[in-house]
Amino acid sequence: MDTKAFKRSLQQSENYHRKGFGHAEEAASALQSEYQSNLIQQIRDNNYTLQRGDVTIRLAEAFGFCWGVERAVAMAYETRQHFPTERIWITNEIIHNPSVNQRLREMQVEFIPVEQGEKDFSIVGVGDVVILPAFGASVQEMQVLNDKGCTIVDTTCPWVSKVWNTVEKHKKKAYTSIIHGKYNHEETVATSSFAGKYLIVLNIAEADYVSNYILNGGNPEEFLAKFSRACSAGFDPDTDLECIGIANQTTMLKSETEQIGKLLEHTMMKKYGPDKLNEHFQSFNTICDATQERQDAMFKLVDEKIDLMLVIGGFNSSNTTHLQEIAIERGIPSYHIDSASRIGSGNRIEHKPLHRDLEILENWLPDGKIVVGVTSGASTPDKVVEEAIEKIFELKAAVVV
């Protein structure tokens, strides 16, 4: 399938919309009232610091809703306003935040059901309105919806589209796309659907395995078993790693994406020589600005004297998880929650430790004066951050009393 031609044809269709419906002002007003916070703005204006009683809050200088997320949510609101009576679906969570997705359900935006790991598009009727989320949708899903004659509202973040353009360039030159990401994340699923040959690596350890195979060879059966769910059909590690290009899931840790790129660049230079590098390796900068800004702000925050870190965002949010990793690497106690409801009375918190299921911890806030670092993922509204901060103030005040 010529994915580039299909996308061009889809974008020229009268059933395809990517720029909203002229209700931007109303959508912006709704987002401001539902998701913005006067308290958070106050903290921003006070050098990202707020002290109350024994608690000092230090807020990261970049956090929360990014432009792409805000745009996607605003377009979803516009869609409901423009199609007040039509049945509206969304192919995935609009963003990785439970409160925002619940709000869409309340607006009668329905989510495509998943049966045994597969989305059931049979439930979508001819002419229904379907929203593609900020993470995008696979080209196969777009084709199904287009064939049904659906009205498609595409809120895909432009940074994600930029990655798609990159793998299209790889495919044009018959390069294999090495994608730094999570093979089952909807963004990476979408990106790989636009690629030709591809291999998805989760981290530097997997990239190192690939590098070693390129330089020294190995057992192809072992290789394919290791990447069984993370490579294109018919992938042959003995031939498909001769020419490679780098791409990434936009929410991955920037430093690791760069590390993987440099490792594979040096690998191909060693294998084929510096004069042949451009014939075997391609790299374009596809690191999302917003992801980078939030990670940079987190690195700056953890350099300060902080007693503990609160990281707020959806548990399935990749960019939020990577923010948590930064605090953990610095040895700072870190608590990942998706909403203020996880902070309970009696100094109790229900949180998600890295790579583990939810746990309940008693007496998580230390006695006496404390400094709490706070950040949030790119899909987290300021209002949710405000609610969590207020819960901390309440708990500490109760302890003092």
Image (cartoon, rainbow, N blue to C red):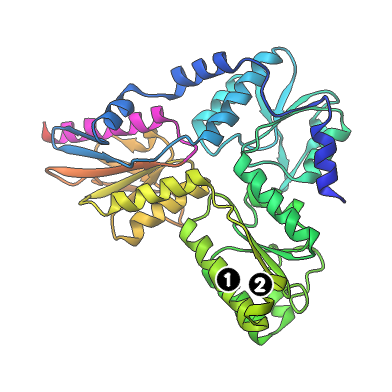
Badge 1 density bin: few <14, some 14–19, many ≥20, Cα 10 Å: some
Task: Give the labeled residue for mark 1.
Answer: 206
State if disc 1 and disc 2 touch (CB < 8 Å).
Answer: yes
Real-space CA distance between mark 2 and mark 1, rounded to the nearest whole angstrom? 9 Å
Q: Nearer the viewer, mark 2 or mark 1?
A: 1
The answer to if 388 sits in the magenta stretch is yes
Q: Nearer the viewer, residue 181 or 176?
A: 176
Q: In the rendering, which numbered label is found on residue 177?
A: none
Q: Nearer the viewer, residue 300 or 307?
A: 300
Up-down relation of residue 369 to residue 232 (above or below): above
Split into 4 quadrants, where in the image is the C terminus?
Answer: top left
Q: In the rendering, which numbered label is found on residue 226?
A: 2
Up-down relation of residue 105 to residue 50 (above or below): above
Q: Amino acid at mark 2?
A: Lys
Q: Nearer the viewer, residue 355 or 169?
A: 169
- Tell me which segment is drawn in magenta: 378-399
Q: Is residue 390 visible from the viewing direction of this image?
A: no
Q: Main secondary structure of the magenta part?
A: helix
Determine which quarter of the picture holds residue 341.
top left
Q: Residue, x 70% and y 36% (percent of image)?
A: 91
Badge 2 density bin: few <14, some 14–19, many ≥20, Cα 10 Å: few
Going by the image, does 350 lie left or right of 27?
left
**Image x and y of residue 241, in percent:** 72, 74
**Image x and y of residue 326, in percent:** 38, 56
Q: Secondary structure at mark 2?
A: helix
**Image x and y of residue 279, in percent:** 72, 72
The answer to if 180 sits in the magenta stretch is no
Up-down relation of residue 222 to residue 171 (above or below): below
Q: Amino acid at mark 1?
A: Glu
Going by the image, does 61 lie left or right of 245?
left
Q: Secondary structure at mark 1?
A: helix
